[in-house]
Amino acid sequence: MGRKVFISVLGTGFYTTCSYASDGFCSTATRFVQLATLERLQSIVPWTGDDRLFFLLTDKARKDNWETSASGRRRCPWSGLEEEYVGLKDELGKMNLAAGICDVDIPEGKNEAEMWEIFNKLFSQIEEGDELYVDITHSFRYLPMMLLVFCNYAKFLKGTHTCSISYGNWENRDRETETAPFVDLLSLSALQDWTYAAANYLDNGNPQQLVALGKDTLKPILQAAQGSNPDASALGRFIKYLPMVIDEMRTCRGISLVKATNIGRMKKEADNMGQPFITPFVPVFEKIKSNFSGFDVQANPQNGFRAAEWCLQNGLYQQALTLMYENMVTLICMEEGLDWEHEEGRNLVGNAFKFYQENTPEEKWVLAKDPANPCPADKAARVKMLMENADLRALAGLFANIRNTRNDVNHSGMRNNPMSVERLKNNIKGYFKELEDVCVRMPEVRREEKPKLFVNLSNHPSGQWTETQLAAARIYGEIRDMPFPNVPDEADEADMDMLAGEYIGLVLALGREYDLTVHVMGEMVLTCRIVQALLAEGIRCVASTTERLVVEKGNDVKEVSFRFRRFREYLS
């Protein structure tokens, strides 16, 4: 942990005695707001000899308000009379502060050069990881703004953390009690953080700071609500899914993007929430919703093209190329009823694109993954059929251009006649525009429709369920029981891996034919392994929640029963 550092600018005015109050605290009456601020800070956090108190002084401030001794006198501008006036240096000495006191000479700040001199002098005093407590009450001219910017600057370059920005509002004091309020301005620093985070997402597609700020803001709200604030809970889940979706695009996770599992979850939470209640997040939230409005929540190759568009907008050219290339294959696979998630079907489509574009004679056809072997007769027949697909013919030239450009990028331009950066960028943008134009002429929705199936992987057969539970399950599709396995007490980690793998395989096999929801309830360790693996594959998993009912029968006899309430979704 770094030092605690107090920063204040001392002015040149004649300060009258006043107390300062905030949140139940009221300071001792003093001429100097710095003393009241330090009194308050000492009541909140402990200060040690390693900590520092920095006072920025012009020559006039040093003479008028810092070094005036106990015998000094100053003329009061309101009364015209001279008063005893003890300077801030001596008053600080009376407080017996543990932290070291440092007076820093600064110019008056009459021009830009003097402004940068002040900035650099202060920055040189700051150490890595310091915690900053800033008082801007007597900061003159532009210094309050400079100190706000300084806090952000130090945070990024020296890892500091701004803990307090305060202002003693003497002008708004109570004239009867001579008590003025402290004004907490830390939210201005937070607004700068949100501004930077929003710009980083909107300009670069980087959600890291946005997510961190959202979590920090939500944490106390969720703790106080204890689950009773649905909007806060929905926003928390939205913020959780956002980086997952963006990471899928950055790493070209084609299957997840086409299925839009996490995108669908994020859009669902956005719809549930309506409008976020964190004010700086609102415009960014609307932009994010707009970014993902074109995604289908069911499996659709257009989702891959939308992801490619997002990558292109955020300068991720290699990812955009890969997604464009692979989603043309996915689109044709879905049209032709091929398994778009596995290599065998995708290789057939890749060959069909290549052979059609290059007008390759059938006797020279070879497998894409094994050019030494001729294409088997059954696959040759399938490729020939694919080559008759009108959409494949329309996309074949574009497919070849994108493939060539992707090879140039993936091989770092280490080939004959590598493209320049500008040519690459222009080509990729042009290919996407051409792809959009072609896809507009295709059917509006390219969706893989699968029948829905609700797999009951538990020790409670659906035949024993109440009608309420059956009705809730049927929303997810036709119900099929899969008994949860018995887990021996002596089972070790290897046994658990084997057992989990067996049942994960059974479920995934069903997933090729059905839009699955899996009800997983059983031995906890095995349940955890199965659920984690299925969620990673984009398969929805749920648990049943029940209400425990207890009836006292007398003589210490209780009758316990359970009433089904709802299915609750597991989250990754």
Image (cartoon, grey):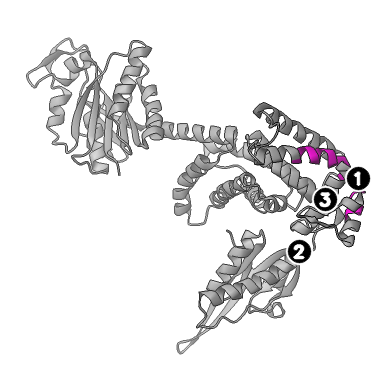
Residue 175 visible in the snapshot: no
Residue for point 25% across, 37% down: 40
Q: Which residues are magenta?
A: 383-403
Q: Quadrant of the N terminus?
A: top left
Q: Identify the amino acid type marked 2.
A: Arg
Residue kind at label 1, given as amino acid type: Ala
Q: Give the image quarter of residue 165.
A: top left
Between 35 and 361, the one lying in front of the other is 361
| Disc 1 target residue | 390
Residue 116 location, x and y as percent?
Answer: 35, 18
Q: Is residue 176 magenta?
A: no
Q: Is residue 169 left or right of residue 377?
A: left
Give the crowd class for mark 3: few <14, some 14-19, many >=20 residues within 10 Å. many
Q: Percent from the top left, x then y, of residue 117? A: 32, 18
To which residue does mark 3 refer?
A: 351
Rounded to the nearest angstrom, the CA distance separating label 2 from label 3 is 23 Å
Residue at horizontal 88%, vertical 54%?
383
Please identify the quarter of the rendering in which residue 438 is found.
top right
Q: CA distance from mark 3 to mark 1?
A: 16 Å
- Residue 283 x, y percent position in the rendering: 59, 34
Identify residue for label 2: 512
Quick one: SS at disc 2? loop
Q: Secondary structure at mark 1?
A: helix
Q: Are marks 2 and 3 in contact (CB under 8 Å)?
A: no
Near mark 1 (Cα within 10 A), the count class, few <14, some 14-19 or many ≥20, is few
